[in-house]
Image (cartoon, helix red, strand yellow):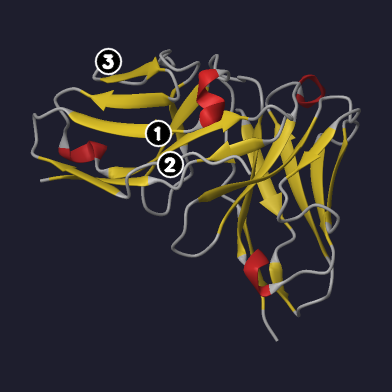
């Protein structure tokens, strides 16, 4: 079945780095642009980054631009988020989702359960 | 910066119509999506392209658009519709933005 599984979260100190992964299965991953979205504890959804299906275009929220890098490996059906110089305000559950519709037209119709990143000294 | 503005909360009784608005300049040029999120669960797409409903979403969910405002309408809201709702859109420079979210209470 169609599935996204995020991993790589944990507790890290401010200023350090972390790499998140999102493993896709059940659909042709290489056909879809992919997003990272995060949600801080008790807060709303925040869009983080988008990468095109062929990695030719990447877009970032102002809050992470210059610190985070989105990438993908279509041979491994995996999306990545390299997080550098992390800050306390990066503490959140990070989830991935496709731009286009996988199971139904409209896009962002499949989500993982997310991986939790906690930035604390 | 690009912003989408939603009311923080909306409350209706079961069977009433709930309307949640989302305002932002980008909405005059870009389509909106609406997501429903229940506690501890991943978001679920309920409306795309302002007015389209994905298969499997109940007909009581509908979307509309006028100028810089889009509206999610739940006709005959049910207790199980109680959730947080987020609007979402693209921006002129290909970024994306979520609204702040609206907590819908049905009681």
Circle 1 sits on which residue? B22
Q: CA distance from mark 2 to mark 3?
A: 25 Å
| Crowding at mark 1 (Cα within 10 Å: few <14, some 14-19, many 20+) | many
Q: Identify the chain of the residue marked 3, using the numbered disc in the image.
A: B
Expressed as whole percent of the image width and height from the top left, the position of residue B92 reads 69, 27
Q: Is residue B35 above or below residue B68?
A: below
Q: Report helix, strand or loop for mark 1.
A: strand
Q: Identify the chain of the residue marked 1, using the numbered disc in the image.
A: B
Q: Residue at x 24, y 43 (%)?
A: B82
Quadrant containing the N terminus of chain A is: top right
Q: Residue at x 85, y 64 (%)?
A: A84
Q: Is residue A95 above or below residue B19?
A: below
| Foreground: disc 3 or disc 1 | 1
Q: Earlier in the sequence, mark 3 or mark 1?
A: 1
Q: Report helix, strand or loop for mark 3.
A: loop
The mark found on residue A66 in the picture is none
Q: Report helix, strand or loop for mark 2.
A: loop
Q: Earlier in the sequence, mark 2 or mark 1?
A: 2
Circle 3 sits on which residue? B59
Expressed as whole percent of the image width and height from the top left, the position of residue A106 reads 55, 18
| Residue B39 relative to residue A112: left or right | left
Q: CA distance from mark 3 to mark 1?
A: 20 Å
| Crowding at mark 3 (Cα within 10 Å: few <14, some 14-19, many 20+) | few
Front-most of residues A85 and A75: A85
Circle 2 sits on which residue? B5
Q: Are marks 2 and 1 on the same chain?
A: yes
């Amino acid at each position: 079945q169609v599935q996204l599984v995020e991993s790589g979260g944990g507790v890290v100190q401010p200023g350090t780095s972390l790499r998140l992964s999102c493993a896709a299965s059940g659909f042709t991953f290489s056909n879809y642009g992919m997003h990272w979205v995060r949600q801080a504890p008790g807060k709303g959804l925040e869009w983080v980054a988008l990468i095109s299906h062929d990695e030719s275009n990447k877009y970032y929220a102002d809050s992470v631009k210059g610190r985070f890098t989105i990438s993908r490996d279509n041979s491994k059906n995996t999306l990545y988020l390299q997080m550098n110089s992390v800050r306390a305000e990066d503490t959140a559950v990070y989830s991935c989702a496709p731009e286009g519709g996988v199971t139904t037209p409209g896009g962002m119709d499949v989500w993982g359960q997310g991986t939790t990143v906690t930035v604390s000294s | 910066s690009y912003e989408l503005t939603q009311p923080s909360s909306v409350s209706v009784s079961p069977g009433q119509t709930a309307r949640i608005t989302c305002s932002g300049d980008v909405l005059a040029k870009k389509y909106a999506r609406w997501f429903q999120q229940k506690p501890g669960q991943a978001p679920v797409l309920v409306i795309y392209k302002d007015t389209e409903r994905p298969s499997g979403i109940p007909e009581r969910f509908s979307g509309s658009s006028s100028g810089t405002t889009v509206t999610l309408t739940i006709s005959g809201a049910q207790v199980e519709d109680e959730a947080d709702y987020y609007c979402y859109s693209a921006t002129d420079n290909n970024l994306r933005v979520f609204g702040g979210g609206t907590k819908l209470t049905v009681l």
